Amino acid sequence: MILLVDIASLALAASAGYVAFVLWKKTKDEKVGEARALVHAGEGRTRFMAMCGVLTSTLFGFAIAVDALGSIVGPPC
């Protein structure tokens, strides 16, 4: 049962990572410039948030995979 939950969680993290990656690719044409000017204009924030989504889902995917490995290798309590 624990392994099924781990697999479902890993699939959810992978799908969230895919969505974040697609959004990151869509925002590649945002303006590039000095940080001070971009903060006032609000440019670059969506690209930053999409990259954070990619990195976060990768981190959670790795943690879920390590947890699943522990469920497979270790003896059940």
Image: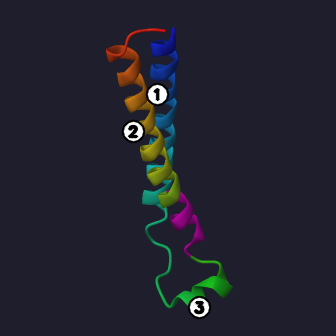
Q: Nearer the viewer, residue 65 or 16?
A: 65
Residue that protrudes farthest toward the left in the picture? 73
**Quarter-wise, where is residue 46 in the image?**
bottom right
Magenta stretch? 44-50
* First reached walking from the N terminus: tag 1 or tag 3: 1
Q: From the top left corner, tell me how far across and down residue 15 is, in percent.
A: 48, 35
Disc 1 residue type (three-letter):
Ala
Q: From the top left corner, tell me how far across and down residue 16 is, in percent.
A: 51, 40
Q: Nearer the viewer, residue 41 or 68?
A: 68
Reply above or below: 68 against 53. above
* First reached walking from the N terminus: tag 1 or tag 2: 1
**Quarter-wise, where is residue 42 in the image?**
bottom right
Crowdedness near tag 3: few (<14), some (14–19) or many (≥20) residues, C-alpha within 10 Å: few
* CB atoms of marks 1 and 3 within 8 Å: no
Alpha carbon distance from label 1 to label 3? 39 Å
Q: Residue at x 45, y 14 (%)?
A: 3
Eye-nearest disc, 2 or 3: 2
Task: Find disc 2 in the rendering and name its residue.
Answer: 62
Disc 3 residue type (three-letter):
Arg
Q: Residue at x 48, y 44 (%)?
A: 57
Q: Which mark is residue 32?
A: none
Task: Find disc 1 in the rendering and name its residue.
Answer: 11
Crowdedness near tag 2: few (<14), some (14–19) or many (≥20) residues, C-alpha within 10 Å: some
Q: Which mark is residue 36?
A: 3
Colour theme:
rainbow
Reply above or below: 7 against 65. above
Question: Is 72 a magenta residue?
Answer: no
Q: From the top left corner, tell me how far across and down residue 22 is, in percent.
A: 45, 50
Alpha carbon distance from label 1 to label 2? 12 Å
Reply above or below: 73 against 33. above
